[in-house]
Image (tube, rainbow, N blue to C red):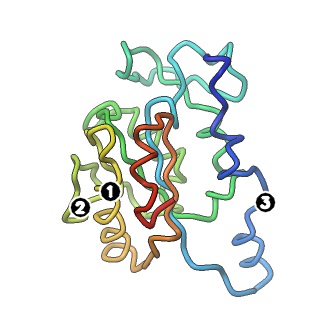
């Protein structure tokens, strides 16, 4: 693990706290408008292969191959393992990855689906689609060019509206990636 890399779990945009939306629902109060948290895969939802024993909060997924950065056994990041304790727990989820997330039908995609709440957030796992996803085929987009991930967001919003009858305002979209060159293009886009 890179000692200069701050865990996304402790990023100021993703505080670890009880979800106000879930608390409001339990009390019968009006829920806030829906939000969407979009995650990169490699080194955001996943950690370096072989790092589980050295990086706190990570979990190795035995028997699940992660093909990124030379390959190895999939290690879920601190963020992925503890996602249910963050403010994003009350949001819908999506993925925009430069990589293939293990490829079609992979155990890696199934593991990531489980991390994102499995059927609880979005019913059955939709098919994953290649970038740019303009027609809104899926909330899970792979092979997105670095620096252009924001172009897949409108399709993801269309998918949620069409498939889940959930309209999500652009101001309630939050994107998380380990690379600044993927985050910068979101500035001024209406998304966070």
Measured in 3D between alpha carbons, the distance from the residue under mark 3 to the one under mark 2, in whole angstroms, is 32 Å
Foreground residue among 138 and 64? 138
What residue is pinned by disc 2?
137
- Per the image, label 1 sits on a secondary structure element best described as loop
Residue density around tag 3, few if under 14, some if 14–19, many if 20 or more, within 10 Å: some
x, y percent for residue 121: 51, 62
Along the polypeptide, which appears first: circle 3 or circle 2?
Answer: 3
Confirm or deny contact between disc 3 and disc 1 (CB under 8 A).
no
What residue is pinned by disc 1?
126
Confirm or deny contact between disc 2 and disc 1 (CB under 8 A).
yes
Measured in 3D between alpha carbons, the distance from the residue under mark 2 to the one under mark 1, in whole angstroms, is 9 Å
What residue is pinned by disc 3?
18
Residue density around tag 2, few if under 14, some if 14–19, many if 20 or more, within 10 Å: many
Question: Residue at image x 31%, y 33%?
Answer: 99
- Relative height, residue 15 to residue 56 (above, below): below
- Relative height, residue 57 to residue 181 (above, below): above
x, y percent for residue 165: 39, 80
Residue 77, by quadrant, is top right
């Amino acid at each position: 693990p890179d000692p200069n890399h701050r865990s996304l779990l402790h990023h100021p945009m993703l505080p670890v706290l009880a979800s106000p939306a879930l608390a409001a629902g339990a009390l019968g109060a009006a829920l806030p408008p829906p939000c969407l948290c979009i995650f990169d895969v490699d080194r955001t939802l996943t950690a370096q292969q072989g790092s589980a024993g050295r990086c706190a909060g990570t979990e190795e997924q035995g028997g699940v191959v992660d093909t990124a950065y030379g390959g190895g056994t999939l290690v879920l990041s601190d963020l992925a393992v503890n996602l249910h304790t963050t403010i994003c727990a009350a949001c819908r989820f999506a993925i925009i990855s430069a990589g293939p997330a293990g490829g079609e039908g992979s155990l890696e995609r199934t593991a990531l689906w489980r991390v994102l709440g499995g059927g609880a957030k979005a019913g059955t796992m939709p098919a994953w689609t290649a970038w740019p996803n303009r027609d809104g085929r899926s909330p899970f987009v792979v092979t997105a060019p670095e620096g252009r991930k924001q172009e897949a967001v409108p399709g993801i919003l269309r998918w949620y509206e069409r498939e889940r009858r959930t309209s999500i305002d652009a101001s309630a979209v939050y994107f998380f990636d380990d690379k600044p060159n993927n985050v910068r293009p979101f500035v001024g886009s209406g998304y966070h």
